[in-house]
Amino acid sequence: MSETHNEETRVLASSGNIFADLGRPDAEEAFARVQLAQQIAKIIERKGLSQKEAAELIGLDQPKVSALVRGRLSGFSTDRLLRFLMLLGQDIDIVVRDKPNNHPTAHISVVIAAQLGAFTHT
């Protein structure tokens, strides 16, 4: 005889930011850092760089590059990640604007130009 459990599982929709979903006070910054690190990993892969080669380009040792591409971001500030992107040949545009009146708080977002389609800088 088999036993049947009728447990209800509660599913919540994600906000799109796991750190906000977990209630972290620095959720916006943490999520931006993750997005920047993901982009660094994609660029390293796209350029066919080994972790050692990437380390030489951005001024780290290979174990730190390994940690970075695996999402272990302790010790990697937003500023530092932006510097790595520049060293990997990426342009970075920072846009500051007033938050919309219908948003309760200001936020940080990372937009990857490739996701926008044809994006040009003059």
Image: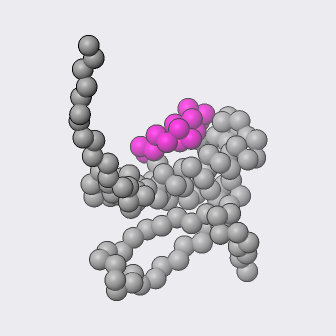
Measured along the vertical axis of the image, is residue 102 above or below residue 34? below
Viewed as shown, does residue 57 lie left or right of 7? right
Task: Name the residue rendered at 42%, 58% in the picture.
Answer: 16
* Quadrant in which the C terminus appears: bottom right
Which residue is located at x 39 percent, y 70 percent?
107
On whether residue 41 falls in the magenta region, the answer is no
**Numbered circles on residues, count:** 0
- Residue sitting at x 23%, y 34%: 6
Q: Is residue 45 left or right of residue 67?
A: right
Q: Is residue 91 left or right of residue 38?
A: right
Image coordinates of residue 116 in percent, x first then y, are 65, 69
Does residue 26 sit above or below 74 in this rendering?
A: below
Q: Nearer the viewer, residue 62 or 33?
A: 33
| Residue 61 in which image quadrant | top right
Q: Which residues are magenta?
A: 61-75
Quadrant, the N terminus? top left
**Residue 104: x and y, percent?**
29, 77
**Residue placed at 34% from the left, 86% from the top?**
101
- Residue 118 spot, x, y in % from top left: 73, 72
Q: Residue furthest right?
A: 48
**Residue 66, x across and y down, in percent:** 57, 35
Residue 91 to residue 56: above or below: below
Q: Nearer the viewer, residue 13 or 67?
A: 13
- Quarter of the image holding residue 36? bottom right
In this orientation, which residue lies closer to the viewer: 61 or 15? 15
Q: Is residue 64 visible?
A: no
Q: Is residue 30 positioned above or below 111 on the image?
A: above
